[in-house]
Amino acid sequence: EVLPQDKEREVRRLQEQGKKVAMIGDGINDAPALMRADVGVAIGAGTDVAMESADIILMKSDLMDAVTAIELSHATIRNIKENLFWAFFYNACGIPLAAGVFYPLLEWKLNPMFAAAAMSFSSAFVVGNALRLRLFRPKYAKTTTALPKEDIQKESTHKEEIGMKKVLKIEGMMCNHCTGRVEKALNDLEGVTAEVSLEGKSATVTLSKEVSDETLVQTVTDAGYEVVDIQ
């Protein structure tokens, strides 16, 4: 609840104390602070200005993705250091041997064909090590539970009433593109007719068959937004 210049001023104050600052925002008023921060992070469902000002864009409206981004950055830097070490170590051993440095003393030499094969193996080793990043999994697993546990259990034991209307309160919608995305995702569900309101930050769904609250919540979450309440 402060003005854009106040956010930027706070980020600058922390930087002047010698700290590295990451700023997460989703609106126009966050843009100055996102640009000032060492690392600007924009919410994927935010405004275009915020996304243009940021260094990283979170695909979904989940702040835990920022933690995942930091973990992935650490894993990437560690992988780069490993590749540099093995590349230098490999060449430090192979180049003197190929140049005949050890031949006068130990009569060691390297056949050019084996030298070419060794260089190819070196490249394959570095690429293979880099591809390990495809196996990256965040340490902090993301869990999406927008409804209280007791409500979810209740829904699993009671059938939905046919023709029943529900109102989903949704966070993260900033424009008509967002509402259209949510509306399409909900209407793609069998037995669901949805109308989404940007002003009310809500979606009114009419059920023509049994559809659980969990399914509705998961559908909105997969679209990149968060259900905070169901009425």
Image (cartoon, rainbow, N blue to C red):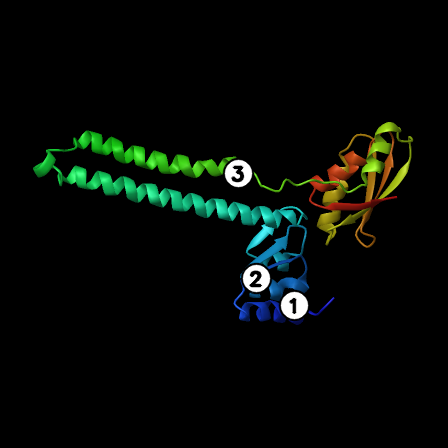
Mark 1: amino acid: Lys
Q: Real-space Cα distance between discs 2 and 3? A: 25 Å
Mark 3: amino acid: Phe
Indicate the position of residue 24 as horizontal and vertical percent values. Answer: 63, 57
Q: Which residue is drawn at 77% across and 39% down?
A: 217
Disc 2: CA contacts within 10 A as few (<14), some (14-19) or many (>=20): some
Q: Answer above or below: position of 131 versus 33.
A: above
Secondary structure of the residue carrying tag 1 is helix
Indicate the position of residue 203 as horizontal and vertical percent values. Answer: 82, 45
Q: Residue 203 has which mark? A: none
Q: Which residue is drawn at 56% across and 63% down?
A: 37
Left/right of residue 156 with respect to residue 133 in the rendered view: right
Disc 3: CA contacts within 10 A as few (<14), some (14-19) or many (>=20): few
Q: Residue at x 67, y 54 (%)?
A: 46
- Tell me the residue that label 2 is attached to: 21
Secondary structure of the residue carrying tag 3 is loop
Indicate the position of residue 137 as horizontal and vertical percent values. Answer: 56, 38
The quadrant the N terminus occupies is bottom right
Q: Residue 7 has which mark? A: 1
Q: Answer above or below: position of 206 versus 22.
A: above
Q: Which residue is drawn at 72% across and 44% down?
A: 181
Name the N-terminal-most of marks 3 and 1.
1
Q: Nearer the viewer, mark 1 or mark 2?
A: 2
Q: Residue 136 has which mark? A: 3
Name the N-terminal-most of marks 2 and 3.
2
Viewer-closest of 50 and 105:
105
The quadrant the C terminus occupies is top right
